[in-house]
Amino acid sequence: MAKKTTLFECQHCGFTTPRWMGKCTNCGAWDSFIELNDHQQEVAKQTKSASSSASKAISINEIKENEVFRYSSLDKELDGVLGGGIVPGSLTLIGGSPGVGKSTLLLKVGSNIASLGKNVLYVTGEESAGQIKLRANRLNSNKDSLYLLSEIRLEQVLIELEHRQYEFIIIDSIQTMYSENITSAAGSVTQVRQITFELMRIAKEKEIAIFIIGHITKEGSIAGPRVLEHMVDTVLYFEGDSSQELRILRGFKNRFGPTSEIGVFEMRAEGLISATDVASRFFSRNSEQSGSALTVIMEGSRPIILEVQALVSESHTSNSKRQATGFDNNRLNMLLALLERKLEIPLSGYDVFINITGGIKITETAADLAILAAIISSFRDRAISKETVFIGEVSLVGDVREVYALDARLKEAMMQNISKALVAKKPLEKTKMKVFIVDEVTKLLEWY
């Protein structure tokens, strides 16, 4: 008699092992392994081997290029993030915190596509069709070719696809869907993996663009197994505070376009709309105050002017606070140590707080010079002119180094009537702005 095989699966990341483990060696989660039955083991093997069919290697010169066709979603910002539009047969995953506007955005996009004469199916597992109808009324998104299906069973969705030919499908959300052929609960690793595999097969076979809404964990990643992000073609994250008007759609994976682009949306009474005047939304030209400096960052190919705010106050405890919102806290500590070492500014007895306005998270080093300028401005209580931008990366030895796309950054600043710029190196293109070269942080003190 054949020995029964056992297989345990982590419910956080989908890692499998033949024996039970208290801690997952892949993601570090504790007590996350459950034993799979025979059917669940078969499903896991099928999805893992789905893309490993036997094939013969051929010369790359003999391979024909696949032409990628796109159609517009009638939303400029979304098209930009996707690389120019929606690709038929693509599988896209959108994640974001609750209330950020994922369902609102996709309902509006579905309505836009339906207005082009394409059949759109909106599958809702979290809300009833009546609730979606109320939102559609508010968004003015009622179209004859936009169909709603309140269903969480995958098999019923597949039956609906046999009744009518659709060109665009929205799944809201992947964690609420389940297959009757799998005994595990909805949202489990096995369910999410199998349903995503079926949706991917449908998208490729029928050339249907499918958008999936996914919940995120408290750490900010998509809930469910990591294989979910590997299986889909595009992964987008919706960022922003539900109390703020602006939302940012950021691409993290895109097999059909760039992954560094962002889309900026504005939440209004009629729903999420593209923020056309985004250039002046992340900084203020009001009265000059100490602790504020302007910089220009690049989000993909888009330059954005940001206002960096700093507050330096005397600490009343033995441990001074260093806190940053929208900026890396470890890099802030490095810059503060550099200020004490190179500029001899005694910040050890002061609390330092950094804030990036507009909810933007700075992920590049071009804002280092602006961070230092804002901190010195707050420490000395001297305001910085709002006609000046600071662009440069600061090294540990105190050098200010040049950043990429400097000409594009200066051009954007000049369009916003900013007349001065402090940079590490002279730009390649001629500009009407007054450009001052700051190659060492010690020269920054000359501006105060």
Image (cartoon, helix red, strand yellow):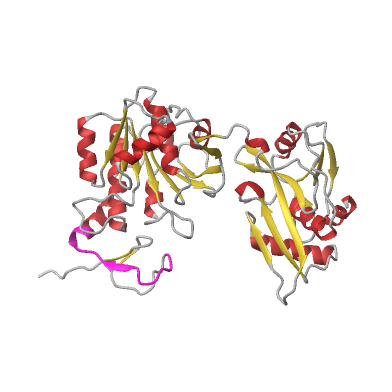
State the residue in front, 181 or 213: 213
Quadrant where the N terminus is found in the figure: bottom left
Q: Quadrant of residue 67?
A: top left
How many marks the image carries: the answer is: 0
Is residue 74 rendered to the left or right of residue 151?
Answer: right
Q: Residue furthest left?
A: 1
Q: Position of residue 40 (x, y in %)?
A: 22, 59
Q: Position of residue 110 (x, y in %)?
A: 39, 32
State the residue in front, 155 or 286: 286
**Vertical order, 126 against 41 (above or below):** above
Can residue 87 be seen by looking at this rendering?
Answer: no
Q: Residue at x 70, y 64 (%)?
A: 333
Q: Quadrant of residue 275?
A: top right
**Vertical order, 259 against 193 (above or below):** above
Is residue 346 rendered to the left or right of residue 188?
Answer: right
Q: Residue at x 19, y 58 (%)?
A: 39
Q: Quadrant of residue 325?
A: bottom right
Q: Position of residue 145 (x, y in %)?
A: 32, 26
**Vertical order, 193 against 386 (above or below):** below
The magenta segment: 27-40
Q: Is residue 388 magenta?
A: no
Q: Residue furthest top?
A: 117
Q: Position of residue 44 (x, y in %)?
A: 27, 56
Q: Residue at x 39, y 45 (%)?
A: 213
Is residue 135 rendered to the left or right of residue 401?
Answer: left
State the residue in front, 222 or 70: 222
Can residue 26 be seen by looking at this rendering?
Answer: yes
Is residue 342 rendered to the left or right of residue 78?
Answer: right
**Vertical order, 17 against 444 (above or below):** below
Q: Residue furthest bottom?
A: 318
Q: Is residue 35 magenta?
A: yes
Q: Residue at x 62, y 54 (%)?
A: 326
